[in-house]
Image (cartoon, rainbow, N blue to C red):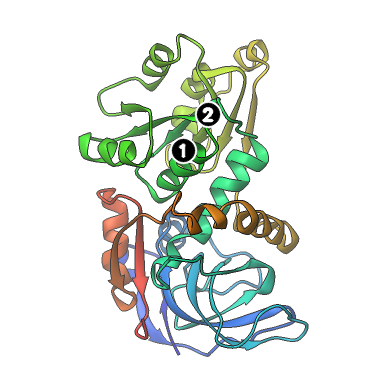
Amino acid sequence: MYAITIPEPGGPEALVWAEVPEPVPGDGEVLVEVVSSAVNRADVLQRQGFYNPPPGASPYPGLECAGRVLALGPGVSGWSVGDEVCGLLAGGGYAEKVAVPAGQLLPVPEGVDLVEAAALPEVAATVWSNVFMVAHLRPGETVLIHGGSSGIGTMAIQLAKAIGARVAVTAGGREKLARCQELGADILIDYREQDFVDELRKATDGAGADVILDIVGAKYLDRNVRALAVNGRLAIIGLQGGAKGELNLGALLSKRAAVTATSLRSRPLAEKAAIIAAVREHVWPLIAAEVVRPVVDRTVPMAEAAEAHRLMESSSHIGKILLAAPNA
């Protein structure tokens, strides 16, 4: 088969479409013929040499895919050859075939095109696990979503609105904020021109956000704590603004607030399976009902993954960037 390989870390040109051995499904795994994958920030870090796959995972980038079941490994039940599926991966999505733990597979939601289904697993699992399973966002609360026009952001807006929360977002520029508003965002903050702490206080009569979903990390840490409401919960899922910051414990104590930080890729299989089961129970019905939908910026041929990475790094996209396999 063919896959995107990384012979040497570097820029987008480091991604090479090359012939590689086919994966063999092990115990509890399903072999999937990949129709599409999606680009995530973690893939860019892996290409640069900063985020290696966990032990035993595929060496090729790609944290999600959509496709058809080709074969079942020992001990697998509940899936059949030919099933159309999408799945959460520890790696290997940028390839024509990938072996996926059965607990990390999902049926393609009703009404979603097979290619577009690759836009769902990683964002749905990340948002549901952090915003709802960890931070426990409730109806009537206010959530602040940083990077509202990103793949994670567009999913978070829709899910938060679906449960009856008030949604604030940060994004860069009018076009991105307009798209966030179309998806249901109530409070629109242009991080290039406005201070999100001040804007959020104005919009909430000084209360702040009950939950903050943050992809930035250190650069926003102090301001995120200041933006939290009493009993607020800050969920950190990215480090685009650095990994080390100073945390004001006094401010955190005074607000009885909590800070959590999670990564999805390296979690044990059982934890990932539990998250996927929760996504199937809570998110998939919303997609079938067209309350929530995948937001796709564009689809690029998988062999041209370098171009997709350039687009990701430019931050000019809205929603997900997909990679279509040759058999799409």
**Mark 1 element type:** loop
Indicate the amino acid at tag 1: Gly
Q: CA distance from mark 1 to mark 2?
A: 8 Å
Determine the residue located farthest toward the front in the rendered image.
Answer: 289
Q: Residues within 10 Å of mark 2 (few under 14, many from 20)?
A: few
Q: Position of residue 13 (x, y in %)?
A: 29, 69
**Mark 2 element type:** loop
- Image height of 102 relative to 141, above or below: below
Q: Is residue 151 left or right of residue 226?
A: left
Residue occupying image coordinates x 38% and y 39%: 147
Q: Position of residue 290 (x, y in %)?
A: 44, 54
Count numbered badges in the picture: 2
- Image height of 45 relative to 218, above or below: below
Determine the residue located farthest toward the right in the rendered image.
Answer: 75
Q: Is residue 70 left or right of residue 5?
A: right
Q: Is residue 5 left or right of residue 280?
A: left
Circle number at residue 245? 2
Image quadrant occupied by the C terminus:
bottom left
Residue occupying image coordinates x 56% and y 74%: 58
Indicate the amino acid at tag 2: Gly
Residue occupying image coordinates x 56% and y 50%: 126
Q: Position of residue 237 (x, y in %)?
A: 54, 43
Circle number at residue 279? none
Judge whether residue 51 can be spotted in this image. no
In the image, 157 versus 149, the foreground residue is 157
In the image, 106 versus 161, the foreground residue is 161
Q: Position of residue 104 (x, y in %)?
A: 64, 67
Residue that label 1 marks: 242
Pointers 1 and 2 in contact (CB under 8 A)?
yes
Q: Which image quarter: residue 190?
A: top left
- Image height of 55 relative to 222, above or below: below
Q: Residues within 10 Å of mark 1 (few under 14, many from 20)?
A: few
